[in-house]
């Protein structure tokens, strides 16, 4: 009874301290820490470790469904903390289950592990020199999207919460996910496969939180967007078939190249004329066109590849219908045939931040970062397979700054590029955000 009473008092104290911080505005200027001293000490104890883990993982990147070293590092760490560990989930995924001393909800925290087929150009002591084979080609491998920071922050969070186990009112499920960038050709992977394999069950997850680093957002800052925060993504293939003929006598055949040009132009009217753009943005992009072998031959076939993106599930369905109508009717008018395959390999839902959950967590995030360092941002047209978790349970996906303070956003290198760079000096803020959101949900459900 004494221990339980002490736990209740500590939780009440935590809540009061968080409220005071929320009222104070800038946490760095007016409040040393929103956490009880015991918890703050645990957080401080992992700050250097998080940076070390991040740099080690950065130096040893692995492609999707091949994160063997990273998975072993994570599993060993979780076991050392007394956390239940499941391995080989969705190929190389690792799941840790931390059961608190008191009953309560199940909170899932997610980090993705995979790197990209990009050759690093950043001049840092821990730069990657790794080479691997991706879809039959030898490539350089680099953490060019910051997943190394995600893993390190969640490892640090696991250590903090494991040390705070006696005060936890609920269970934490740590999800270390492979292949967020997509699995190799011919394989399943990522969040979709993890959900299919039951990662949100046994125990059943009540809520899920995710953090993504941003090379364009300044360190010390957090951004969020309620509702659709990242777009759905469906890749597509269009094959236009005509009748081959000599380029000097086009009337003797049916030109799939001219028809393809008309289809590409007409597809842009989906966004400009069919969608209510004041409500939700949308994108239709044709990124590859291939047809023909020489200048004076009209070919028999043209292939196009592209991506379709939306920020609302209803818009996504409407766009698919419009694409079928435009492609089929334009082809018919041009005297050719056309087939649409959608999706080809990628089909991510809208990454949707539960509005009530988001509104509830904004003051929590302000408590750990300071009110002036938490900003409401516009949704992004990039996609994230965190969306598969948030389709099943309420979710919140936020962005953490990784841009050095002395570098402007216009000078910062974009994600998925050889020059992508993250300042890892404030990864502790990601740990604090994970911890604060977890405890707030557990204690104030």
Image (spheres, rainbow, N blue to C red):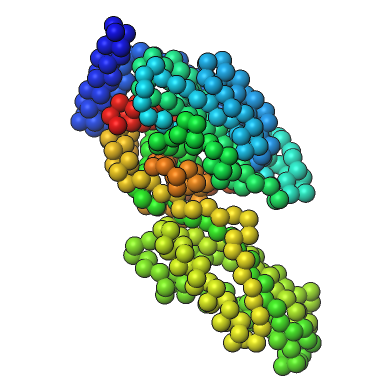
Residue at 52% x, 19% y is 83
Q: Position of residue 269 (x, y in %)?
A: 47, 75
Q: Position of residue 358 (x, y in %)?
A: 33, 42
Does residue 423 appear anywhere in the picture? no
- 239 and 151: which one is in front? 239
The answer to whether residue 153 is left or right of residue 103 is right
Which quadrant: the C terminus? top left
Can you name the residue that lies furthest to the top here? 2
Quadrant where the image shows the N terminus:
top left
Q: Residue at x 29, y 23 (%)?
A: 34
Residue 162 visible in rendering: yes
Is 192 placed left or right of 210 in the picture?
A: right
Residue 31 picture quarter: top left
- 21 relative to 403 in the view: left or right: left
**For residue 298, what is the image quadrant?**
bottom right
* Residue at 61% from the left image edge and 81% from the top image edge: 331
The front one of 243 and 220 is: 243
Task: Indicate whether 228 appears above or below 119.
Answer: below
Residue 112: percent from the left, percent from the top?
55, 37
Q: How many marks?
A: 0
Residue 165 vertical position relative to residue 318 in the rendered view, above or below: above
Residue at 68% across / 31% down in the picture?
Answer: 68
Which one is in front, 376 or 296? 376
Rendering coords of residue 267 (x, y %): 52, 73
């Amino acid at each position: 009874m004494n221990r339980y009473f002490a736990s209740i008092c500590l939780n009440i104290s935590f809540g009061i301290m968080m409220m005071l911080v929320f009222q104070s505005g800038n946490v760095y200027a007016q409040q040393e820490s929103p956490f009880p001293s015991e918890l703050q000490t645990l957080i401080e104890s992992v700050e250097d470790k998080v940076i070390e883990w991040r740099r080690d993982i950065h130096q040893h990147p692995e492609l999707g469904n091949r994160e063997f070293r990273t998975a072993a590092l994570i599993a060993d760490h979780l076991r050392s903390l007394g956390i239940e560990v499941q391995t080989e989930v969705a190929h190389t995924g690792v799941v840790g289950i931390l059961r608190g001393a008191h009953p309560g909800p199940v909170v899932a925290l997610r980090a993705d592990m995979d790197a990209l087929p990009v050759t690093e150009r950043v001049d840092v002591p821990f730069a990657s020199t790794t080479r691997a084979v991706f879809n039959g080609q030898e490539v350089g491998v680099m953490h060019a999207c910051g997943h190394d920071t995600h893993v390190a922050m969640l490892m640090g969070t696991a250590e903090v919460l494991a040390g705070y186990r006696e005060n936890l009112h609920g269970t934490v499920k740590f999800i270390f996910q492979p292949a967020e960038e997509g699995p190799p050709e011919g394989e399943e992977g990522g969040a979709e496969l993890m959900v299919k394999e039951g990662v949100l069950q046994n125990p059943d997850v009540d809520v899920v939180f995710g953090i993504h680093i941003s090379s364009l957002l300044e360190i010390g800052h957090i951004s969020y967007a309620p509702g659709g925060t990242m777009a759905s993504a469906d890749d597509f293939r269009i094959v236009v078939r005509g009748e081959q003929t000599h380029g000097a006598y086009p009337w003797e055949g049916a030109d799939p190249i001219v028809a393809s040009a008309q289809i590409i132009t007409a597809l842009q009217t989906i966004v400009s004329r069919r969608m209510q753009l004041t409500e939700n943005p949308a994108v239709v992009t044709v990124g590859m066109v291939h047809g023909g072998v020489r200048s004076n031959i009209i070919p028999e076939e043209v292939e196009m590849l592209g991506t379709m993106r939306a920020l609302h599930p209803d818009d996504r369905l409407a766009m698919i219908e419009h694409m079928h109508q435009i492609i089929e009717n334009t082809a018919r008018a041009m005297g050719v045939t056309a087939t649409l395959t959608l999706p080809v390999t990628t089909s991510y839902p809208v990454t949707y931040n539960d509005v009530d959950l988001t509104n509830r967590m904004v003051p929590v995030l302000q408590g750990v970062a300071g009110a002036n360092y938490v900003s409401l941002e516009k949704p992004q047209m990039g996609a994230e397979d965190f969306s598969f978790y948030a389709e099943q349970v309420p979710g919140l996906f936020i962005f953490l700054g990784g841009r050095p303070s002395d570098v402007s956003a216009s000078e910062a290198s974009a994600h998925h590029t050889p020059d992508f760079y993250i300042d890892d000096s404030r990864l502790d803020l990601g740990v604090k955000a994970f911890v604060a959101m977890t405890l707030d949900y557990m204690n104030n459900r």
